[in-house]
Amino acid sequence: MSAISLYARPSPDFAQKLAHSLALLKTAAAKYSPLTQASSLGAEDMVITHLMHEAGLFDKPGVSIFVLDTGMLHAETVALVKRIEERYPVTVDVYHPDADATSAFVEENGPQAMYKSLALRKQCCHIRKMAPLDRALAGKKGWLTGLRREQSAARAEVHDIEQQPERTKVNPLVEWTQGDIWHCISANALPYNPMHDQFFPSIGCAPCTRAVTLGEDFRSGRWWWENESAKECGLHVAADGTHEAQEPAAFEPLSSIIPIREIPA
Ligand code: SF4
């Protein structure tokens, strides 16, 4: 069963939400340029990219999209970069982690270090996500994310505009439901990760993502061995640290080692 047939159910006020998101994107481009979208290539981010196009943002200087290719993403995820570039007049900026840092980390801690302790998991996220994120956001005045309030308890307080110390974070989909997202994908035939059709509602790095079963929380397939209330990689941790993960109980690693793609120099 496809994700569209499972989830595409627009809210009664979907038209108003759509209009609000488009207006917010235009405001963001006017006030916070250079403005960039942090795309995880997930369903929400495919919607945002489409709305950026609908709002005419790709005609404006200073608007961009970036992806953090951690070297641990599924091939289905990476393939979406090309599909975005085929459909929209935009080139996606792809940021990779430092090759020496990833090699040294794997050599010292093993390819499954993220399961050994919270500290090692966070260190892996720092090398593969946070350090490249800093490079991607350098010089940007604003950034766009696909955060939605209903995604998790940690995201329930997210606002559509959040002032951060160095830039403004704009979240155009805070009020959208999962049904709204999939309605938009269906109505506009947007490209999306085929893994969503296999019960992966939230897709990150391969070792840290699994399918969920019906009734499980949206984020339950991410870092599933950690504290339920704190599944963030650091990109969206609140300024006061309230979304920080807690040390998990002992975890039995996967029996199979997930291959790590080579990081371009
Ligand atoms: S999500 Fe997992 S594999 Fe990806 S950077 Fe974080 S710990 Fe490493």
Image: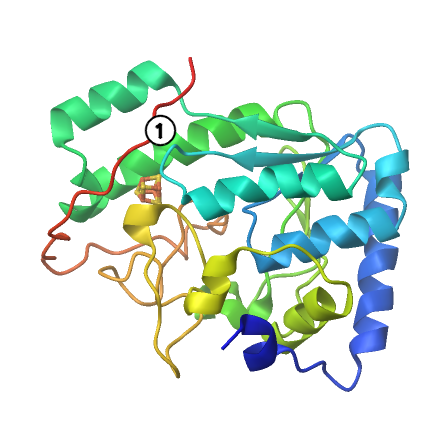
Image quarter where the C terminus lies is top left
Q: Position of residue 42 (x, y in %)?
A: 55, 54
Check mark 1 vs ligand 1: CB closer than 8 Å? yes or no.
Answer: yes
Viewed as shown, does residue 192 lie left or right of 100?
Answer: right
* Amino acid identity at mark 1: Ile
In this orientation, which residue lies closer to the viewer: 184 or 35? 184
Q: Residue 38 vs residue 126: left or right? A: right
Quadrant hosting residue 260: top left
Give the quadrant of ligand 1: top left
Q: Is residue 164 above or below residue 150?
A: above
Percent x, y for residue 263? 38, 22
Relative to 199, does residue 214 appear above or below in the rendering?
below
Residue 31 placement, left or right of 260: right
Q: Is residue 20 above or below residue 13?
A: above
State which quadrant residue 28 falls in: top right
Q: Which residue is mark 1?
A: 127
Instruction: State the colouring used for the structure image.
Output: rainbow
Seen from the viewer's position, the closer of residues 55 and 264 is 264
Which residue: 32% across, 60% down?
210
